[in-house]
Amino acid sequence: MVVLFVLLEVAALSYYARSNAYTQARLLTRSNQVVGGVQGVFTSMRTFWQLGAENRRLSERVIALEQELAAYRGAEAEGALLRLADTMKHQPYFYTTARVTTSSINRTRNFVVVDQGSKAGVETDMALLSAHGAMVGHIVSVSKNYAVALTILNPLFQASGKLRHNPEYYGSIRWEGGDYRYVTMHELSKYADIHVGDEVISTGFSDYFPADIPIGEVESFELNETGTYYTVRVRLAADMSSLSNVILARNPNSQELKGLEAKLKKRYQ
């Protein structure tokens, strides 16, 4: 009975479909909709089951692109360091570049370790600068492939600074502890024309640092109790929390200068 019913239904639909063009068009449209719907369901199911593989391919592509981008960034940073070092060649200093392997900012005495040592010509007393050429510290210990620098965030660090627009007056630079973003310039003459935002640079008096190396900018200042000197809060130009590529600078005459200083001290002590 079921088979007979199906055969009669097929015959009726066939007769109805051939009755006129309008009916044929409606049936064709309806059949296309049904077939399209069924195909759509199967397509959606197939797409769903392929999502895992597609996501894996996309993830692999993202990883490959990230690695490529990192390589470009590294090359660009290295190029920037070399260009900066190249601009400094007119000064009587030897320059080389390195990468930071270890650093600290929250200890009482902070240090930086770089991946260049005596094999690359690194020596003690070389200046350590950021990738942008700002003051960071100086080398105190060297092995064959590594070197350790005392940073500006260390009470043992010594340097002097001056105002770029008013360079005849200078003061001593020291870290007071606490915030790694700031140091203090002490004993700046009251006659210095100082303003918030003024750039503080190195004097060149140090055995380590060339003149005019950026240290930071004036955050605030106040006269001491006797009204003779300014105490200046300086925001560091170097971001000590994210050191990566750095520059090492050595004064080739530093040993000669130190020898003369030692002789003078011995003679007049």
Image (cartoon, rainbow, N blue to C red):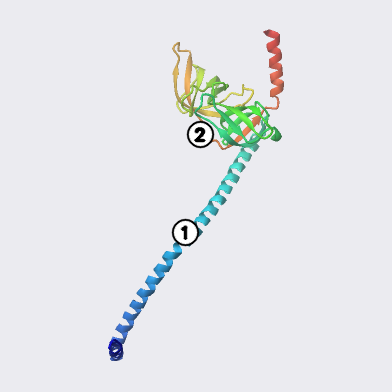
Residue in the image at 30% along x and 83% along y: 26
In the image, residue 144 sits, relative to residue 72, either above or below, namely: above
Count of numbered labels shown in the rendering: 2
| Nearest the eye: 19 or 13 | 13
Mark 1: secondary structure: helix
Quadrant position of residue 142: top right
Residue at the spot 69% in from the left edge and 15% down from the top edge: 262
Q: Is residue 185 visible?
A: yes
Q: How far apart are marks 1 and 2 (CA)?
A: 36 Å
Q: Residue at label 2?
A: 241
Q: Quadrant of residue 27?
A: bottom left
Task: Judge depth for marks 1 and 2 and give the one in front.
Answer: 1
Residue 190 visible in the snapshot: no
State the mark number for residue 55. Answer: 1
265 vs 189, nearest the viewer: 265
Q: Which mark is residue 94?
A: none
Residue 63 higher or lower than 169, as above or below: below
Q: Residue at x 52, y 36 (%)?
A: 242
Give the x, y percent position of residue 34: 33, 77
For badge 2, the amino acid type reads Ser
Q: Vertically, is 108 above or below 76?
A: above
Give percent across and percent down for residue 93: 67, 30
Q: In which quarter of the image is residue 204?
A: top right
The earlier-in-sequence mark between 1 and 2 is 1
Kind of residue indicated by mark 1: Asn
Q: Which residue reaches farthest top? A: 269
Pinpoint residue 196: horizontal percent, then vertical percent: 45, 26
Q: Camera-side residue: 192 or 125? A: 125
Secondary element at image label 2: loop
- The quadrant in which the N terminus is found is bottom left
Position of residue 240 measured from the top left corner of the image (x, y, whole percent): 52, 32
